Amino acid sequence: MGWGTNEQLIIDILAHRNAAQRNLIRKTYREAYGEDLLKSLDEELSSDFERAVVLFTLDPAERDAFLAHEATKRFTSSHWVLMEIACTRSSHELFNVRKAYHDLYKKSLEEDVAHHTKGGYRKLLDPLVSAFRYQGEEVNMTLARSEAKILREKISDKQYSDEEVIRIVTTRSKAQLNATLNHYNTAFGNAINKDLKADPEDEFLKLLRAAIKCLTVPEKYFEKVLRQAINKLGTDEWALTRVVATRAEVDMVRIKEEYQRRNSVTLEKAIAGDTSGDYEKMLLALIGAGDV
Amino acid sequence: MGWGTNEQLIIDILAHRNAAQRNLIRKTYREAYGEDLLKSLDEELSSDFERAVVLFTLDPAERDAFLAHEATKRFTSSHWVLMEIACTRSSHELFNVRKAYHDLYKKSLEEDVAHHTKGGYRKLLDPLVSAFRYQGEEVNMTLARSEAKILREKISDKQYSDEEVIRIVTTRSKAQLNATLNHYNTAFGNAINKDLKADPEDEFLKLLRAAIKCLTVPEKYFEKVLRQAINKLGTDEWALTRVVATRAEVDMVRIKEEYQRRNSVTLEKAIAGDTSGDYEKMLLALIGAGDV
């Protein structure tokens, strides 16, 4: 696949992005290359620029289904991507991902996740991707208190993958979970994620902490993914492209605020300093940067 | 609530039932009694006749959400009803139940199920009610063979609630599961449900067998529920009403065939012999009986 000399045009269109224009890109792409964007993506794109263009252009549900599918395949497997999709999308968005997954892969998301994970990871990830959380703001304070106590007990006993911990994290509404964790903090003097740092190298604990972060303060989670992607020796383009393409139209403004607060440099400057060429221009267009 | 002398009219309308007429009943009910049918149901109906009328008249997704909610409450709790709803509805129907549950109860179905069950029951029921199985007929025979082998090993070791058994039963498409169980039967000489009868009194095993039956031969499952409800000393009206109201417009024809084959008497005759009055007339109208 080659984009010829149209890179600047594509970036220009995307800089003034909206769904209709993206559909236009998709249509143009099909006419020019005779195949669907998603198929090209599946056959592996040759550059970070192309991956960014194609990921962003996809319909959000298809894009997430694609990323989730990639995350269950051997060489691109990632518990983190699965957790991120399950915990930061709304209940209806997540269900649309599951529908798109049926259509694209003739399987269910949860069967692939269950088949390709095991132990604590499966116990956590399968209910996460299958959840259809209640989205109202109603909160039951009695329940918040009793479940904060359960979490505290299990964490004190180092039973991090206990079924009660998993149940609370994977089934409660985000509003309810937030109330529970606020009560945890007030009653026991520590934020739960501090208590979950007992063993900083435990990979399951890292994932559990990240899930809690995604469910309660997603912009902080994404800020950290971006920070680590950019600061890494050699840049993690895979993560950088994913977060920019999936959050551009959702909560990028908040993520940028969070980034600047935490790093004392704008996300624009950080990306510009770490990437180059069309890929750089594309990312900057997607995060809605002016001249850097 | 009193129906006055309208019972025969209601039965007559329901005998020629369709969705528009049911909406009419619902509307008439609201005008006559000043409240929604679902609310009346929640406040406990005084007779089996009324429960049958109200259950049948509800929209299927609301009806299932109501039954599932009832099944998570202390005095009406039932693992069986939850399993039955999760396993015999289509993937989209089950998702509509979950949506109706949000609307009616301001909670998710899976959080109530997880909260009110434990141990093996929770391990089985939570993924069952959260499933969105792929519905295509495509079957992967390599997978069917390898998963039949896993099932056989776990069952031989009496590890009935092993996570691999649960994974296969709760996530695979019905077509895929059927292929796996056919292979099980061919390769190991026994139907899986025969091997799962090791301890006939084990309640978890009973539920697991019933789930497998619901997923593969639902009409046989419903035939058995009806048979046991009718044969029971005193009749189990709760089960009888549920199965008739929920299956009347779905697969009652096949269930009746199955009933006659297994009991050498028609379902009509069996119901007529065991019930009376308006309740009897109502059930017979719902199963589409002529004169008995």
Image (cartoon, coloured by chain):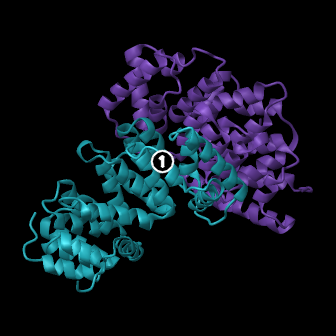
Chain colours: A cyan, B purple
Left or right, B240 with respect to A53, comes to right
The crowd level at tag 1 (other Cα within 10 Å; few <14, some 14-19, many 20+) is many
Residue A211: x and y in percent read 46, 54
Q: Residue at x 46, y 49 (%)?
A: A197
Residue A72: x and y in percent read 32, 45
Left or right, B211 with respect to A118, comes to right
Nearer to me, A237 or A258: A258
Position of B270 relative to B90 (above/below): above
Q: Quadrant of the N terminus of chain B?
A: bottom right
Q: Residue at x 40, y 28 (%)?
A: B180
Would you identify the image quadrant in which residue B175 lies? Answer: top left
Position of B177 relative to A262 (above/below): above
Q: Residue at x 66, y 60 (%)?
A: B106
Subunit bearing disc 1: B
Left or right, A237 with respect to B94, comes to left
Q: Is residue A99 visible?
A: no
As helix, strand or loop, the secondary structure at mark 1 comes to loop
